Image: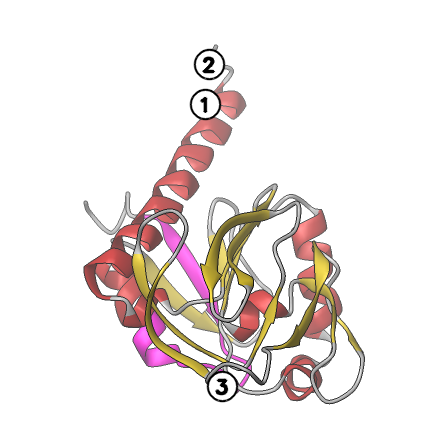
Amino acid sequence: MSAATAPHVVLLDYGVGNLRSVERALTAAGAVVERKTDIDVPEGAGLVLPGVGAFQAAKERLGSRFEDLRRYAHADRPLLGICLGMQLLFDESHEHGSHQGLGLIPGTVEALPREVVVPHMGWSRISTGEVVYFCHSFGARPGPSTTSTVEHGALWTAAVRRGRVRGYQFHPEKSGPTGIALLKSWLDELSSSSSSSSSSVRGAP
């Protein structure tokens, strides 16, 4: 695939995230990746929200971009959250207090139970069959937007989808060929949506 036809992805750089690894994985999956510090996403491109660390600290780092993200998603633009980036998509987090999320995915982020090893770190099989890499101490219980789950003392959301908003609690960039394949699937959807939009503009049936 040439650079002209490869899907375009904006990777949001807000000082919280494993940017280099995520960028490498997206590139390996076939994307042209552009790091940006603002929510300036060209038409037909997708936005990736990475994240590691604490919920409120990430929200503070986002600053005014937090509301920009909400407006972007409400405009039916493609958004993928990874790990903490996925948790920010939810209504609320109870990590060190109560903090409002973006409200793009219904549900609440809560602490993993003390009865299991925390953080949940390492390879786990999710309900759709893939074996992927996790590293998290908080998570969301399965809800209406959950597309896959993982068992760790209880069932937890591994992936979510609502409209054009998607999220992975695991790290696809650390999940080897499986993670690359999952990212490629998302990129294929971007390319398909972009092509459909272009056809509509040209008046194609």
User: In the rendered structure, which amino acid carries the disc numbered 2?
Assistant: Ala
Q: What whole-number distance in Å separates the C-alpha atoms at marks 2 and 1?
A: 5 Å
| Image coordinates for residue 140, horizontal then vertical, percent | 62, 65
The quadrant in which residue 178 appears is bottom left
Disc 1 marks which amino acid? Ser
Residue 199: give its label. 1
Residue type, numbered disc 3: Val
Callout 2–callout 1 Cβ contact below 8 Å: yes
- The extreme front residue here reads 115
Q: Which residue is mark 3?
A: 118
Crowdedness of circle 2 by 10 Å Cα count: few (<14), some, many (20+)?
Answer: few
Q: Does 40 sit left or right of 94 as displayed?
A: left
Marks 3 and 2: which is nearer the front? Answer: 3
Residue segment shown in magenta: 7-23
Q: Position of residue 49 (x, y in %)?
A: 52, 68
What residue lies at 42% left-to-right and 43% top-to-bottom? 190
Q: Earlier in the sequence, mark 3 or mark 2?
A: 3
Left or right: residue 88 compared with residue 103: left
Q: Secondary structure at mark 3?
A: loop
| Residue 122, percent from left and from top | 33, 77
Residue that label 2 marks:
204
**Residue 129 versus residue 121 in the image, above or below:** above
Residue 120's image quarter?
bottom left
Q: Nearer the viewer, mark 1 or mark 3?
A: 3
Residue at mark 1 to residue at mark 3: CA–CA distance: 49 Å
- Colour approach in the figure: secondary structure
- Residue nearer the viewer, 4 or 108: 108
